[in-house]
Image (spheres, helix red, strand yellow):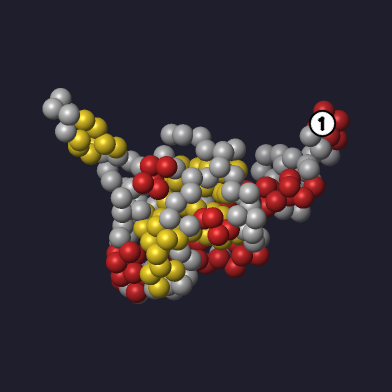
Amino acid sequence: MAVLVGRKAPIFKTKAVVDGGKIVENYSLEQFIDKKYVVLFFYPADFTFVCPTEILAFQEKLSEFEARNTVVIGASTDSENAHWKWLQTPRKEGGINGVKYPLLVDQNMQISKAYDVLAGCEEYDENGDETFTGVPQAYRGLFLIDKKGIVRHQVVNDMPIGRSVNEILRVIDALQYTEAYGEVCPANWNKGEKAMKPTHEGVADYLSH
């Protein structure tokens, strides 16, 4: 998998379903440059099993992301119609009704490829014909993008393994703390805890407490 940390996040324009049911054209991350942090997460497919638990978990914590000036955006290789239908389906029937943040359409798999989370790939046979091998779905990739459009954190899980929304909030807190104060955050750091100055003296001071 490619490491995108420290690099500009791949930019794209695609269809998306926003506000729980409105289909829009040409949705892009460019609208957030110099304005907001972005959590862009990929999931394998609509109407599956682990995916709704993650999507609903992000929705339940959405106000905490907003308090951190961060937008949450989901993406899969499903169509806008599949997204829309899933958003209209009640939760007791396996749907994600009530989710308000955008779900991106990556039906041509170009966004998943750009972020290097696609589980399959195109290959050419001995006759030069192109075939797709693997699964045309994304792994559970997540990318934290700062206000300059730089990827500052990424994590990729295999399809059966759900992510921790609380850990993502912790990473945002750490990033924003280091930006604000110039200190660095040690292992298991949480907001409100002591950080370190990026010097040998700072580390010694931290470890002495």
Left or right of residue 132: residue 64: right
- Looking at the image, the residue that sits furthest to the top is 126
Residue at the spot 28% in from the left edge and 46% down from the top edge? 136
> Mark 1 = which residue?
199
Q: Quadrant of the N terminus?
A: top left
Residue 65 placement: quadrant: bottom right
Q: Secondary structure at mark 1?
A: loop
Left or right of residue 106: residue 38: right
Going by the numbered disc 1, the residue's amino acid type is Thr
Percent of width and height locating residue 149: 59, 48
Image: 10 above or below 31: above
Q: Quadrant of the C terminus?
A: top right
Residue at the spot 20% in from the left edge and 35% down from the top edge? 130
Residue at the spot 33% in from the left edge and 64% down from the top edge? 80
Image: 47 above or below 136: below
Q: Which of 119 and 15 lies nearest the eye of the viewer?
A: 15
Would you say residue 76 is visible in this rendering?
yes
Percent of width and height locating residue 121: 29, 37
Image: 161 above or below 23: above
Percent of width and height locating residue 206: 81, 37
Residue at the spot 81% in from the left edge and 38% down from the top edge? 197
